[in-house]
Image (cartoon, helix red, strand yellow):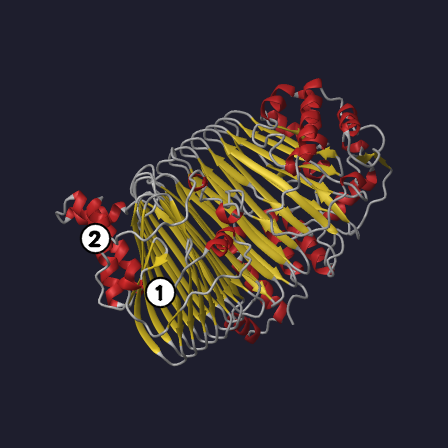
Amino acid sequence: MTALPTRKLEAWRYTDLRALSAISFTAPASPPTPLSLPDLAIPRLVFLNGIFAPHLSSELSFLQPFTPVAEHSAQPLTQINAEHAQAGMTLLIPPGVDAGSVLLVSQASGGSMAFHPRHRITLGAGARLTLIEVAQGDGVYWHNPVMDITLADDAALAHYRLQDESREAFHLATIRADLAKTASYESFTALLGGQISRAEFHVRLQGTGGHAHINAALLLGGSQLGDITSVITHAAKGCTSRQTVKSVLSGAARGVFQGRIEVDRIAQKTDGYQMTQALLLSDTAEMDIKPELQIFADDVKCSHGATIGALDAEQLFYLRSRGIAPDDARAMLIRAFLTEALESVTSEPALAMFETEFAQFQAAR
Amino acid sequence: MSAAVETRDTMGALAAAKYKYGFTTEIAMEAFPKGLNEEIVRLISSKKDEPEWLLAWRLKAFAQWQKMAEPQWARVQHPPIDYDNLYYYAAPSGPAPKSLDEVDPSLLEMYEKLGIPLNERAALAGVESPTVAVDAVFDSVSVATTFRETLAKSGVIFCPISEAVRTHPELVREYLGSVVPAGDNFFAALNSAVFSDGSFVFIPRGVRCPMELSTYFRINARNTGQFERTLIVAEAGASVSYLEGCTAPMRDENQLHAAVVELVALDDAKIKYSTVQNWYPGDADGKGGIYNFVTKRGACRGRNSKISWTQVETGSAITWKYPSCILQGDGSVGEFYSVALTHHHQQADTGTKMIHIGKNTTSTIISKGISAGQSNNTYRGLVKIMPGASGARNFTQCDSLLIGDECGAHTVPYIESRNASAKVEHEATTSKIAEDQLFYCRARGLSEEDAVGLIVNGFCKDVLKELPMEFAVEAQKLLSVSLEGSVG
């Protein structure tokens, strides 16, 4: 197997995978009994320990059979996935078709198993899809999915990801999206579970007028580490990209955000924006941020902002002066902070799902 | 020379030539053989009559350097440097001058051309009181330090570091390498092994340095690396403002400049360090120019101490430089104000590190990058809040301006916070000169170049206002001159 990346690689300087390399994983055994499935009234596809479970899945006309991966990737995790991928969801939405919403569920149950699904989504010109992804499980396992997304002209994919894996699990996801002219990719990722988790995005805006939203929220506690890494490449004129990453860290949790906006020479009139905000709720929490701009065109508007800090003392004081108890005031401010993160979520079932999860996170604190 | 006359002359001269410092001075030179080995390190040390401990320190640094590799992480590209094809020591030949009267007149003339007021008698005879004391470093040695007596009266030591090693060995030994260790990085290790001269400043307890101190660095000899080392120590309650200027002749080959600057501020001490870096940037096709690979670091060791870096970087073919602050003392303050301008084929990878260790430490970073021509300009910085730095504050602003569609502007900030009560804010923008601003200026009769110069100066205002008066005017003019030919 290709070696895991180490912190010597710049892209991995904040996320140490030694805990993962210390475990010897086995290939997934036969599918376990499923946990309770998310209660969303939309068609679903279910994978158990990385293996497709047709009996739990809906029939979808645009679901294609899995084909083996022939890829040689310079990215260690994608390469490992390529070497081991044996299953995955392949969706092919024909031009002009609005495929509605689909739920992709990945469930796992312990036993030091590693699984490397390869999902592929192709949207024809003008096609539409909303994909809601939920990853959950029990015990120690390693989930290493790669998702390849191709969007033709005017296609639009809304992609909502809830990572709610077991607290002992490793979740290292890579999402690669290529966008043609005026295509749109909107995604929101919530990292809640996992011992070490990372969502790595590589988005290429290859046609004029493309649009990408890569938003995320990290809600971590204990000794969890959550990492959002993104590279958005503006390779054509007049594209826009937006990124908002919000983190709430308690205990000894560590949050990482590395975001790079690359603007090629040809990509004039680029509009790129990146914002990352972190709330540190304990003395032992840590946030590491590396927002990068790499710009080779002059007629561009690119900016990023970052803030890290505790809850605003003035806001707390304001609430307390109105008779709100300290704990309630804090909870209120955290809720407001997270509500902002969800502003970009337009799918109602997805929004309801995230709101429930965020409320649970707050209740558990 | 009064400030007004100096300013007028500087501006006149700057308007006349794009790089007015490109002349060479014909002077009888003494140089050691090319190449670097233990023998050269020993030769430099014996030439300077150094004590045994310093030779041992150099040799240790040399041994470390031999095991190190050039850093590869910066966004700069250059052909491999042949460290064996460089002179590591070059100095005007003859015995060292005892006073200004003995300095080679052609050297004084060169500094005159540069507009550096070395001749203190003139100033002393005049009605104005002196405001700037100068240490001039020519290739590997310091040739003259002015106003030493005036400074000595208030207890300030300002002299070439090679002299300080002899006259104040205990001070040099205590502080040399205490901020930038000999093996800190490849270029710092190289400097530690072969540094030949530089300035030493010591401001004793409670003293406010009566005038601004200044060092002018000049690379003159061909194929020569300049490795100066500056050490500034401000004791409790002391304060000093220090200016640094640099020039070099125009040559087709690249020349290496690997300096180390160490600042130490004890309780309540303040050090303000300003640089106008105008090394020869190479010609319009990217031929020649200085490789400016510099390690600058300040340690705020005392409570409420303050170190402020201000830099205007318009020169050098390649700039690799990260003036940093280690904020150790509770309540200490670090500041970094930077303008980096690149044109033609220049490359700059510059920024700062603010390491917050003490409680209630604050840091401010204002960085303005301007790229024109085919140049690449990178801001690279680190803000690190250690767990003990309760109440720490950082504010960072990095703005980039692109002029033309063949250049690049990059921002690579690292922000690491491990204390919940610390507050870190960072913002960065990249844009081009707004059409409406240009139009406004043009409508009022400014030429396009003047308009760009005006807008760029406005863009840099937050940094330029931090410069001492003497430097601010020169810096503004430099920015305009450096941008000539970037529009239209």
x, y percentage for residue A224? Answer: 34, 43
Could you say which disc has been placed on residue B234 in the image?
A: none
Q: Is residue B246 left or right of residue A253?
A: right
Q: Residues within 10 Å of mark 2 (few under 14, many from 20)?
A: few
Observer-nearest of B177 and B73: B73
Q: Is residue A194 visible?
A: yes
The structure residue drawn at horizontal position 67% and vertical position 63%, both measured from the top left corner, is B484
Q: Quadrant of residue B257?
A: top right
x, y percentage for residue B38? Answer: 76, 27
Q: Is residue B468 visible?
A: no
Could you say which disc has been placed on residue A359 in the image?
A: 2
User: What's the amino acid at mark 2?
Assistant: Ala
Q: Is residue B121 left or right of residue B180?
A: right
Is circle 1 on the same chain as circle 2?
Answer: yes
Q: How many marks?
A: 2
User: What's the amino acid at mark 1?
Assistant: His
Q: Residues within 10 Å of mark 1 (few under 14, many from 20)?
A: many
Query: Which residue is farthest right?
Result: B28
x, y percentage for residue B226? Answer: 73, 39
Observer-nearest of A357 and B354: A357
Q: Is residue B396 left or right of residue A246?
A: right
Q: Is residue A351 left or right of residue B441?
A: left
Element at label 2 = helix
x, y percentage for residue A89? Answer: 38, 64
Q: Quadrant of residue A327?
A: top left
Could you say which disc has been placed on residue A159 in the image?
A: 1
